[in-house]
Amino acid sequence: MLSVVARPGNKASRVFGALTKVTVAMADALDKVSDVEIDPEGTFKYILVRVKVKDGDVNKDIVRGTQSAQYHNHIFEKVSPAMEALGMECKCLGGGKIEHNSREKKIRVFGESTAFGKADHSASVEKLKIAFSDYEITWSDDKK
């Protein structure tokens, strides 16, 4: 069995230190991307997107939704270039709809995207619960 010991000053230690700095930099870059950006009111399309630093392994999932998007791909067409400008790449994991009632502090996640398929609504809801901690947030596989 071969093992590498990272002792201060040896090559393995320097490589490990450099890799640690790169990983931390990637995580910092991802931290600057907000987990949730949705319209403050109404029923609208949303997508769940996996964002990662180019040439890296560190990633996170984000939720984006807006009434201005006629189709789910319109949301992705705005998110992708914005992430590329930050040195990221992204992949749409699916979509659906969000019903956001700010007066009653309720959010409902449902439906699916014709272009991208159904998002994992439970994963989307976990992100929404962090961003809207004082809301009642539910999801279903219903299309309406």
Image: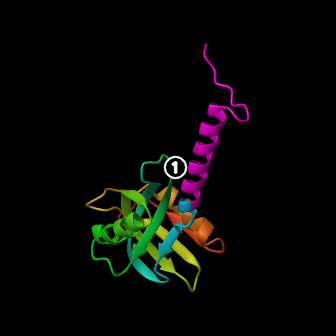
Mark 1 residue crowding within 10 angstroms, few (<14) / some (14–19) / many (20+): some
Q: Above or below — where is 22 with respect to 115?
A: above
- The dominant secondary structure in magenta is helix
Q: Nearer the viewer, residue 36 or 67?
A: 36
Q: Quadrant of the N terminus?
A: top right
Q: Is residue 141 visible?
A: no
Q: Residue at x 39, y 77 (%)?
A: 66
Residue 102 at what x, y percent from top left? Answer: 55, 83
Q: Nearer the viewer, residue 62 or 115?
A: 62
Q: Is residue 60 visible?
A: yes
Q: Nearer the viewer, residue 17 or 60?
A: 17
The amino acid type, in three-letter code, at marker 1 is Val
Q: Residue at x 50, y 83 (%)?
A: 40
Q: Quadrant of the C terminus?
A: bottom left
Q: Secondary structure at mark 1?
A: loop
Q: Which residue is mark 1?
A: 58
Q: Above or below — where is 23 with respect to 66?
A: above
Magenta region: 1-28
Residue 83 at what x, y percent from top left? Answer: 41, 65
Q: Above or below — where is 138 with respect to 1?
A: below
Residue 109 at what x, y percent from top left? Answer: 46, 66
Left or right: where 141 falls relative to 31: left
Q: Residue at x 29, y 72 (%)?
A: 74
Q: Quadrant of residue 7?
A: top right
Q: Residue at x 58, y 82 (%)?
A: 104
Specify whether residue 10 is painted magenta: yes
Residue 128 at what x, y percent from top left? Answer: 55, 67
